[in-house]
Image (cartoon, coloured by chain):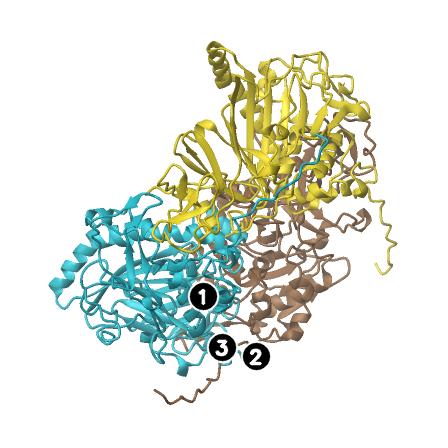
Chain colours: A yellow, B cyan, C brown
Amino acid sequence: MSEQPIIRRRQVKTGISDARVNNAKTQSQYQPYKDAAWGFINHWYPALFSHELVEDQVEGIQICGIPIVLRRANGKVFALKDQCLHRGVRLSEKPMCFTKNTISCWYHGFTFDLESGKLVTIVANPDDKLIGTTGVTTYPVHEVNGMIFVFVREDDYPDEDVPPLAQDLPFRFPERSEQFPHPLWPASPSLLDDNAMVLGMHRTGFGNWRIACENGFDNAHILVHKDNTIVHAMDWVLPLGLLPTGDDCISVVEEENGPKGLMQWLFTDKWAPVLENKELGLKVEGVNGRFYRTSVVLPGVLMVENWPGDHMAQYEWYVPITDDTHEYWEIIVRVCNTEEERTKHQYRFDRVYEPLCLHGFNDCDLYAREAMQNFYYDGTGWDEEQLVATDVSPITWRKLASRWNRGIAKPGRGVAGAVKDTSLIFKQTADGKRPGYKVEQIKD
Amino acid sequence: MSEQPIIRRRQVKTGISDARVNNAKTQSQYQPYKDAAWGFINHWYPALFSHELVEDQVEGIQICGIPIVLRRANGKVFALKDQCLHRGVRLSEKPMCFTKNTISCWYHGFTFDLESGKLVTIVANPDDKLIGTTGVTTYPVHEVNGMIFVFVREDDYPDEDVPPLAQDLPFRFPERSEQFPHPLWPASPSLLDDNAMVLGMHRTGFGNWRIACENGFDNAHILVHKDNTIVHAMDWVLPLGLLPTGDDCISVVEEENGPKGLMQWLFTDKWAPVLENKELGLKVEGVNGRFYRTSVVLPGVLMVENWPGDHMAQYEWYVPITDDTHEYWEIIVRVCNTEEERTKHQYRFDRVYEPLCLHGFNDCDLYAREAMQNFYYDGTGWDEEQLVATDVSPITWRKLASRWNRGIAKPGRGVAGAVKDTSLIFKQTADGKRPGYKVEQIKD
Amino acid sequence: MSEQPIIRRRQVKTGISDARVNNAKTQSQYQPYKDAAWGFINHWYPALFSHELVEDQVEGIQICGIPIVLRRANGKVFALKDQCLHRGVRLSEKPMCFTKNTISCWYHGFTFDLESGKLVTIVANPDDKLIGTTGVTTYPVHEVNGMIFVFVREDDYPDEDVPPLAQDLPFRFPERSEQFPHPLWPASPSLLDDNAMVLGMHRTGFGNWRIACENGFDNAHILVHKDNTIVHAMDWVLPLGLLPTGDDCISVVEEENGPKGLMQWLFTDKWAPVLENKELGLKVEGVNGRFYRTSVVLPGVLMVENWPGDHMAQYEWYVPITDDTHEYWEIIVRVCNTEEERTKHQYRFDRVYEPLCLHGFNDCDLYAREAMQNFYYDGTGWDEEQLVATDVSPITWRKLASRWNRGIAKPGRGVAGAVKDTSLIFKQTADGKRPGYKVEQIKD
């Protein structure tokens, strides 16, 4: 026992390998993306479905740490910063509108013009010298085919620079059919098409928007879905995964005045299905899946073409609420030119697509995203993840998002989620309420 | 598309306006108030109603981040620091008193003299050299008309300097009748009057004590109450608000040896009712309200004279528990000289004042205060709020409080709420328990 | 009133007394212990009872901030770091094992060898260059008499240096009978004995592991138990406490290759029962208790000999999960050589020891530990506690633990509890779930 043993340190094979594809140099190419915990600002985001905001209704939401109040007046939707410039309460908590073109704060009557955001009067102080000298930021709104989009911007982002909504939406067809042909389906429908029918849902995901977004077009996560009911109901036989066959497996799109994003050449010879893993004794025969193609554009919009059925496209957004919550949007777009088509599609949506796809299938994705949250939230994951060949998709996305975003949102200040551990949040939590996207309004 | 457009930055009207009344110079005059997140120390605060502490009962509370244990022995109430000097547990969690003049720690038997706080013995270690060399801080107690007040002090604040309770209570009448006459009601009753009957309640508010306090005497928040049942039950017709007519709308009281505070000349010609807002097409006719007058004194005590009924005054405290919770006290004071008067008043309190005023009417205030919490908690609101003419009340209060407070409480250490996100709090929250004021005692 | 009174500052007797035994010099002798908020690493800890991990079962736990996945394959238990090196999800959340000697990540199919932790394949990417170049840390496992122990180590701690389990378990008898004789009972049973029957339970305690641990062998906390049912059911009459009679009341054990710890000479003449406290008028007559002896060894294992019945020993661990949660283990060890003895012991355990001792009696300890958490969590308690003669036990422990621990665990990174106030935790809390030890698995 008195002899000092010679300690032989083993060769450690548990550290970060030089063989990972995201080495320091690669990471430096997407540093802006690593900084964008609160999202990219000066972009179009979905705010609400049209049916969630009927005439004179007021709703409060939060995007990229910015509180936003929406009101529909005379059919038109307006969006303003939802934080009274006086004492900071949210206008949406207890909506008070005396005219069709204003919204007043329920606390002290500060009244803002819906169109310009200017402080136009104070209910019981109509001659105050502050009136006319200040206001709240307004956000451009675009409503189309049942969806309300808001251009979430910095306070000094000029109206003149607001791009059209189409620049922040997925690639459109047939205008891109030549650029991105696919032999297996006709031109995919777009949200902006005439008679586009949009059905879907949105809910809060409890993780950062980036790790949510990266899951959507990740070609290596097919395993997560192998036990889903839709897969078995359809008698699909999925491959183990898809592998890129060369550098041209993804096209990056960076044309001026168009959406910035990437298109993946899935179900072409640029991605090979993997049918066997000898090490594990796995072998797939008679592959029989659904063909689809994924693309993603800034500020983080997924399109899955030819999914979940023929003549359809699924869009997804992962709208940043705070740095650790996002609003997960899933919609299915289909052009329905007759009332009969609409009725039939709605019926199938209610019975198949919503329960088995938007839930069911995509519930698994929601779970997978939350499962990454601890690893990434304190920065560990961003530095230490070990990515591989199939991660060409997120890496390409990170780089292009770093180059083309219109601004990195600053951490929220003076808003819900800026400080996460206030007693007010504990009170709400004790009452069974989770952090969320919409403002809960007071009932008198 | 190849032409670079000329970007015209718009004239932003959404920033902080030079026309706000709380410019940097004004803010510097109340910097101590901005620093007082944990409250003002070395002041008298209400701790419990007398009926909450019967003979031999022990209760633990927290004020200004200081844990305090109260015990009634031989009718007298004692208050000590509620943190055993040995291992820091709260004596009140499992009260153990072997004699009428001591309290012992339930964990290791450290025993303190109720009067002096000295460590007088250790149950199973009666000869330890620590005994007699240390102790816990005691807090002077004043019990009057059903309320127990505690002088919450720093550990080295001398007994000799403790002021009488009256210095931290609202202005008394008729001694102030000449200074503050009011034609519409007789001299207001005081908590300290003989036969004063005190009825009320207290509960935890989830926001900083200062934003709670400022709501109480804010003359511009009348809108919040327009739909309250008491207003309609009484057929009141409220003006839109009240506007100061000159610099003398508020009197500041800073006499030596008296309470330091402000008195507002409401329902005199120094405040004009606003009956119309042309911009919004609002007009009030046949105003028919209840006349009242508000004043506030350090450490943050509101008095509403002639409210909620004749011969009454409502007092409120916003006792700091932590930097983001306060105990909200509401009491109604009325002098009742006969048993019959007392019975009658109690009856009306139970059926009208408690449900419709202390709840009902004041529930709206509680909500409004919590609505400001996000804006102020991380400092944003204190710097960026844009105050107007009617905010003369809070600004006057902030300045005088900055001049006359007896100390700024240090952030809590080693106590509940010093760190807000411990797993212990998450455990309690998961069990449905909100952060609060009173210690929950263990049942064996 | 115009005369300025002479302010006499009182002699404060509420500060930290020079008579406390843990002065600055003493504290410096256990600084490493003060730094060990996340536990001591490179030690053996209990992970699960054997019956919690049947063949092919997978469970995830967390010790010292390290996520660990356990799997039983062909009867043998394996333990690996439970954080996929790819995107950081926990393997245990949705166990996926294709072979008996691997575990695969359910998200992207990264597959690890159970024995070595090496990345041996990726389900759908079997030729990736990362394979074979990296892996996850493995943890040595020792399963004995119904308990699974894991050697929780730093990533680069060599296999060769892993000590036998016995070095991190309580002193064994009869091999120590000469060193630590006790006249009142025969040699105590050990967990490692042939035919040792181990019955017990584990649950999460909401406080730091150190303050939990110190309670176990603290001879001055007897008061906490005076009202326990087991005490009265047994007609025990407890002394007020136990006082050391000299410097030799505790033996420190620091032999090479053995457990490092301390043995207390309870119920010998080195500790005197205290029967009276004159100051408080307390006197105990006819003392009639249960004789026992406590010892503690690194990394924090309590043994109570001759407790809770004859021929038994109770062991306890306070396994660090994070810096503010620990897994509280209580087991009772008894050698049962026949099936009849086992059956009889199980019967008595179910009816007496589990409800009245492990619960009942020890529930009080659990409470007491949580009661200290606020004082110690922000560091206040570690600096300001005022310890006395009877605290010789924790002080001795702190010093020896500072000298002999095999490493101080670093604060958790990228794991549950590294950041405590994420919205993900608030979501779980709103759903009524407390922070805990075991990973909750997804049901498809």
Tag 2: amino acid: Ala
Q: Nearer the viewer, mark 2 or mark 1?
A: 1
Chain letter of mark 2 equals: C
Q: Residues within 10 Å of mark 2 (few under 14, many from 20)?
A: some
What amino acid is labelled 1 in the image? Gly
Chain under callout 1:
B
Element type at marker 1?
Answer: loop
As helix, strand or loop, the secondary structure at mark 3 comes to: loop
Q: Disc 3 to disc 2, how far (Cα)?
A: 13 Å
Residue picked out by circle 3? C14
Mark in front: 3 vs 1 = 1
Q: Nearer the viewer, residue B387 or B186?
A: B387
Q: Position of residue B150 (x, y in %)?
A: 37, 71
Where residue C12 sits: x, y (%)?
49, 81
- The percent coordinates of residue A149 (x first, y second) are 53, 32
Rounded to the nearest whole Å, what is the CA distance between mark 2 and mark 1? 33 Å
Q: Are marks 3 and 2 on the same chain?
A: yes
Mark number, residue B39: 1
- Disc 3 chain ID: C
Residue A382 spot, x, y in % from top left: 71, 42
